Image: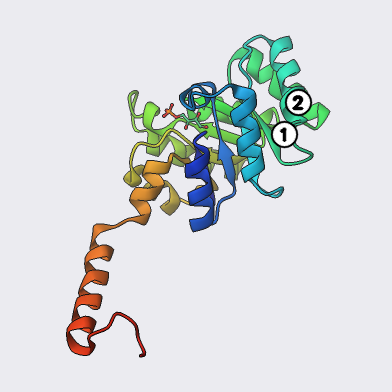
Amino acid sequence: MELIIDTADVQAIKEINELLTVTGVTTNPTIITKSNKEPEVVIKEIADVLDEDQLFFIQAVATDFDGIMKEAKEISQIRPKNMYVKIPVTRDGLKAIKECKKLGIHTLATAIYSADEAFLAAMNGAEYLAPYVNRMCNYGDGVQEVKDLIEMLKVNNLPSKIVAASFKNTYQAHELIKAGIQAETLPPDVIMNMVDHPGTKIAVGEFTMNWQKAYHRTTLFK
Ligand code: E4P
């Protein structure tokens, strides 16, 4: 599975990138505003932190076809490779995804609330599909809907990858990893909750305490 970080917090990206095997970074307009920096500044900072093989996803802000296409071309030129344009699956968005496919621009279909929307975006050539798992849970069983999507792509031989998004807890992430999801984009707090199990800290504390009591040091050899 590809692990992607869903944030524009450059410090968090640096830390998680050192700690784990990270495929890339996703942002959206709201995520960028939370950085409290100008978009040009934070986009450059993130691009500088990533190595050239890591993927960088930036969302088009324009909502009409021409505007999305203009921004798609701009986004795709930010780095020489591995730039992906996130396009919401509106009518204009679906048209733009189809056009990007023709032009060889990498796309991620986003703001997906149903397996059907995702499926149609896959038919238009979106390379990644981002169902909003947690938000979908407001309308039904978001996790199950994404499991359906996994199956729909498989039986129809469509090559698009699902990058499940909008996670609020590790349970949602766990269930979809178990179902064979191709990628997940997770916010730093959910990633760190997966990393930092309190039981592990207690176990390590016990090992150190017992060792210290017996040998009066905290290293294996003197
Ligand atoms: C990422 O690609 C999505 O834009 C993001 O996960 C949405 O998350 P939210 O539901 O927390 O806004």
User: In the image, is 95 to the left or to the right of 207?
Assistant: right
User: In the image, is 98 to the left or to the right of 8?
Assistant: right
Q: Is mark 1 within 8 Å of ligand 1?
A: no
Tell me the quadrant of the picture where the C terminus can be found. bottom left
Please state which of residues 45 and 185 is positioned toward the viewer in this rendering: 45
User: In the image, is 46 to the left or to the right of 173?
Assistant: right
Q: Does residue 215 appear in the picture of this structure?
A: yes
Please state which of residues 204 and 218 is positioned toward the viewer in this rendering: 218
Q: Residue at x 62, y 27 (%)?
A: 41
Residue type at numbered disc 2: Cys
Which residue is farthest right?
103
Label 2: how many Cα within 10 Å (few below 14, some 14–19, many 20+) = many
Please state which of residues 43 and 60 is positioned toward the viewer in this rendering: 43
Q: Residue at x 71, y 47 (%)?
A: 52
From this view, report whether residue 56 is shown above or below residue 194.
above
Residue 16 drawn at (x, y percent): 48, 50
Q: Return the residue at label 2.
A: 100
Residue 29 drawn at (x, y percent): 54, 21
From this view, report whether residue 156 is shown above or below residue 63.
below
Please state which of residues 189 and 104 is positioned toward the viewer in this rendering: 189
SS of the residue under disc 1: loop
* Contact? badges 1 and 2 (CB < 8 Å): yes
Residue type at numbered disc 1: His
| Real-space CA distance between mark 1 and mark 2, rounded to the nearest whole angstrom | 7 Å
Q: Return the residue at label 1.
A: 106
